């Protein structure tokens, strides 16, 4: 009986060993290798050097945006204080001077920058100052004011006075030196090169040429103030007397 029990126990142990041998083995777990230890040739182990510091990128601030002093203006502001500069011609000349060319280039740059603007390029004048000029200058020696027929109400584009005695250039330069923008209008048309090249010569229309030699256009525009008119009258009167 004991022999049979021992036999059964031996068989059981053998089966357990067989099952254990056939069981699925777990795969090995990969573990990180420790960093190599620096070996000091003089003897002993040396710890690894500390990690290099990471430099932060330098943040460059953006360039400040230049303030546009024109874009924020209203239409009334632009008409009152226009960024476009006027172009003046020299006395007895239809040529654009070097200063005038710079003015045209600056005006063109502004118009290119604001393509949505609608601009009228012409001379705008009204009758502001006309009555005052008529009253103050009519009796001044050395001047001749424009003739106006009775019952006629002209649309004043210019206020042309005639400076007598061959003093127009002197008076023109004196007014300009005082900061008053007088002009001369207009060169006889056949004096322009396009007509001169066709054979037209000076002396063809003596009355027109005499008027041109004496003519001086006084300032006249919508924003002309009463104080401006008074200064024009006072300066012109002093120059011709």
Image (cartoon, rainbow, N blue to C red):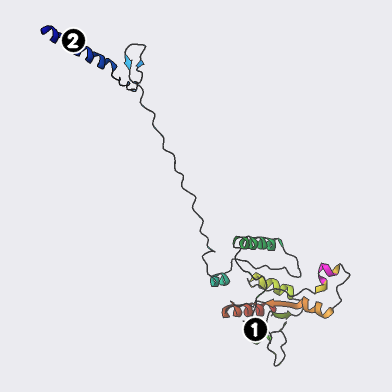
Residue in the image at 81% along x and 79% along y: 208
At a point 83% along the width and 68% down the height, the residue shown is 194
> Which secondary structure, mark 1?
helix
Chief SS of the magenta region: helix
Question: Where, by quadrant of the figure, is residue 93 drawn?
Answer: bottom right
Q: Residue furthest right?
A: 199
Extent of the magenta region: 191-195
Going by the picture, which residue comes out furthest to the left?
A: 1
Mark number, residue 66: none
Q: Nearer the viewer, residue 225 or 240?
A: 225
Badge 2 element:
helix
Looking at the rendered image, the quarter that the C terminus falls into is bottom right
Look at the picture and state if 219 lies above or below 8.
below
Which class describes the residues within 10 Å of circle 1: few (<14), some (14-19), or many (20+)?
A: some
Q: Position of residue 186 (x, y in %)?
A: 75, 75
Hey, which residue is sitting farthest bottom in the picture?
151
Q: Counting residues from the N terminus, which is met first, the one under dot 1 or under dot 2?
A: 2
> Above or below — where is 232 with respect to 68?
below
Q: How many marks?
A: 2
Q: Quadrant of the N terminus?
A: top left
- Most foreground residue, 193 or 109: 109
Q: Is residue 55 left or right of residue 142?
A: left
Magenta residue check for 38: no
- The disc placed on residue 130 is 1
Residue 105 spot, x, y in % from top left = 66, 60
Per the model, the C-alpha gap separating discs 1 and 2 is 140 Å
Check whether the beta carbons of the residues at disc 1 and disc 2 lie within 8 A of each other: no
Which residue is depicted at the point 65% across and 62% down?
108
In the rendered image, which residue does mark 2 sit on?
Answer: 10
| Foreground residue among 190 and 41 | 41
Q: Say which of 72 and 236 sits in front.
A: 72
- Residue 100 pos. (x, y %): 69, 63
């Amino acid at each position: 009986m004991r022999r049979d029990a021992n036999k059964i126990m031996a068989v059981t142990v053998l089966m357990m060993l067989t099952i254990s041998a056939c069981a699925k083995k777990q795969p090995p777990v990969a573990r990180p290798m420790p960093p190599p230890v620096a070996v000091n040739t003089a003897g002993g182990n040396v710890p690894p050097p500390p990690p290099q510091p990471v430099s932060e990128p330098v943040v460059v601030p953006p360039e400040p945006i230049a303030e546009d002093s024109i874009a924020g203006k209203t239409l009334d502001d632009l008409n009152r204080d226009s960024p476009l500069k006027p172009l003046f011609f020299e006395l007895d000349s239809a040529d654009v001077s070097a200063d005038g060319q710079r003015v045209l280039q600056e005006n063109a740059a502004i118009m290119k920058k604001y393509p949505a603007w609608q601009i009228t390029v012409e001379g705008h004048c009204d009758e502001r100052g006309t009555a005052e000029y008529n009253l103050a200058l009519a009796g001044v020696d050395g001047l001749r004011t424009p003739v106006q027929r009775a019952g006629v109400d002209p649309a004043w584009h210019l206020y042309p006075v005639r400076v007598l005695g061959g003093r127009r250039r002197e008076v023109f330069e004196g007014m300009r030196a005082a900061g008053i923008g007088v002009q001369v209008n207009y060169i006889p048309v056949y004096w322009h090169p396009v007509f001169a090249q066709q054979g037209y010569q000076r002396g063809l229309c003596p009355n027109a040429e005499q008027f041109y030699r004496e003519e001086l256009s006084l300032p006249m525009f919508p924003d002309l103030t009463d104080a401006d008119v008074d200064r024009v009258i006072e300066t012109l009167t002093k120059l011709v007397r």
